[in-house]
């Protein structure tokens, strides 16, 4: 989580890096802006889900499971969510304790269990979707289609660069 109340401006960044040509102060400033906005939004998203006895991870799991009525193995849910199996296990346990998911034996291998959303889990998910999307719209605001396309293209490019960085590290 990015916790700076005030982010350094381009001038501060230039002063800090001196003549280092490997650093683009405009890019660094933009990254700080993205991190700050993302962190501020995430705080509000977490507040929203806390009021619903959920978390963003639990909501995401319910979203995925609601579209897989046959259920998913825990490792499949982890893969869909892009999280570790240990983290998925923790998310599943939290959802189970709330009665939002259950485990059913797999038809292929009776020793393995698939995770399915319960009626209560689907109801919580379905009642939250519209409210959650309303919150996101309020936080992001409404912009013309051209500006939204520019933001989406930039964010996708940044995500790809991060993935390339991770893959090459």
Image: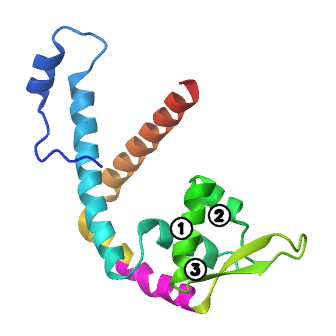
Dominant SS of magenta comes to helix
Answer with left or right where residue 124 lies relative to residue 26.
Answer: right
Q: CA distance from mark 2 to mark 1?
A: 10 Å
**Disc 1 secondary structure class:** helix
| Marks 2 and 1, the one that precedes in the sequence | 2
Answer with left or right where residue 88 lies relative to residue 30.
Answer: right
Find out whether residue 130 is within the magenta segment: yes
Question: Residue beneath label 2, please?
Answer: 77
Question: Residue beneath label 3, please?
Answer: 96
What residue is shown at x 10% (from left), y 18% (from top)? 15
Q: Callout 1: few (<14), some (14-19), or many (20+) C-alpha neighbours within 10 Å?
A: many
**Image: magenta residue range:** 120-131
Color style of the picture: rainbow
Q: CA distance from mark 3 to mark 2?
A: 14 Å
Q: CA distance from mark 3 to mark 1?
A: 9 Å
Where in the figure is residue 29, as x and y percent of width and height? 21, 33
**Disc 2 secondary structure class:** helix
Quadrant assignment, res 116: bottom right
**Mark 3 or 2, which is nearer the eye?**
3
Answer with left or right where residue 104 lies relative to residue 57.
Answer: right
The answer to whether the residue labelled 2 contacts the one labelled 1, judged by CB atoms less than 8 Å apart, is yes
The answer to whether the residue labelled 3 contacts the one labelled 2, judged by CB atoms less than 8 Å apart, is no
Task: Tell me if residue 141 can be seen.
Answer: no
| Marks 3 and 2, the one that precedes in the sequence | 2
Find out whether residue 40 is within the magenta segment: no
Quadrant assignment, res 17: top left
What residue is shown at x 46% (from left), y 41% (from top)? 159
Where in the figure is residue 31, as x and y percent of width and height? 28, 37
| Marks 3 and 1, the one that precedes in the sequence | 1
Q: Callout 3: few (<14), some (14-19), or many (20+) C-alpha neighbours within 10 Å?
A: some
């Amino acid at each position: 989580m990015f916790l700076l109340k005030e982010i350094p401006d381009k001038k501060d960044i230039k002063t800090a890096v001196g003549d280092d040509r490997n650093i683009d102060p405009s890019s660094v400033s933009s990254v700080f802006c993205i991190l700050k906005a993302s962190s501020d939004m995430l705080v509000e998203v977490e507040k929203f889900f806390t009021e619903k006895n959920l978390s963003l991870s639990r909501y995401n799991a319910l979203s995925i499971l609601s579209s897989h009525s046959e259920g998913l193995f825990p490792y499949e849910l982890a893969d869909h969510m892009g999280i570790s199996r240990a983290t998925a296990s923790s998310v599943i346990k939290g959802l189970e304790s709330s009665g939002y998911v259950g485990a059913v034996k797999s038809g292929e291998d009776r020793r393995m269990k698939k995770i399915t959303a319960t009626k209560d889990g689907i109801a919580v998910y379905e009642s939250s979707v519209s409210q959650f999307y309303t919150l996101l719209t309020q936080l992001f605001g409404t912009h013309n289609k051209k500006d939204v396309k520019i933001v989406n293209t930039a964010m996708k490019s940044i995500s790809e660069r991060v993935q390339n960085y991770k893959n090459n590290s």
